[in-house]
Amino acid sequence: MEQVLASRSVSITELKRSPSAVFEQAGSQPVAVLNHNRPAAYLLSPDVYEAMLERLNADLRQAIKEGVDSGPAIPADQVFAELSARFADSKPAIKSRGKRTA
């Protein structure tokens, strides 16, 4: 069974029947929308969604900064050449499936 990551949940049927009531009861809390007792979606208030996006953007900016500060850049063609050389021997053999002739 999948984990429900919200303290409140509602069935899709209940959400379709009365979406305004679900939003009102949820307030600023996230709501799991269940389909056959499994999470199908999560409803978030605009404030929670905006805060989540701001946090993701801040984390992304920090990761980019750490990457930039980690050392000199390596040209992409050099990286691809090294990857090609490293994995050239590990490619699986592909067998041809040509037409049989009688």
Image (spheres, grey):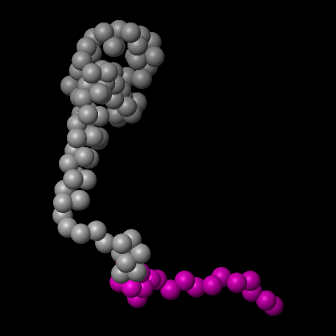
Q: Quadrant of residue 50?
A: top left
* Residue at x 58%, y 85% (from the top left corner): 95
Instruction: Work out whether residue 87 or residue 10 is closer to the camera in this orientation and state it.
Output: 87
Q: In the displayed structure, would residue 6 be above or below residue 21?
A: below
Q: Residue furthest bottom?
A: 102
Magenta stretch contains residue 95: yes
Query: Where does the image place residue 89, in percent across and percent down from the top left?
Result: 40, 88
Which residue sits at x=34%, y=34%? 39
Residue 21 appears left or right of 62: right
Answer above or below: position of 11 versus 70.
above
Rendered location of residue 33, percent (x, y): 36, 26
| Span of residues in magenta | 83-102
Q: Position of residue 15 (x, y in %)?
A: 40, 17
Q: Is residue 25 above or below residue 84?
A: above
Question: Nearest the camera: 102 or 78?
Answer: 78
Query: Does the stretch in magenta take in 98?
Result: yes
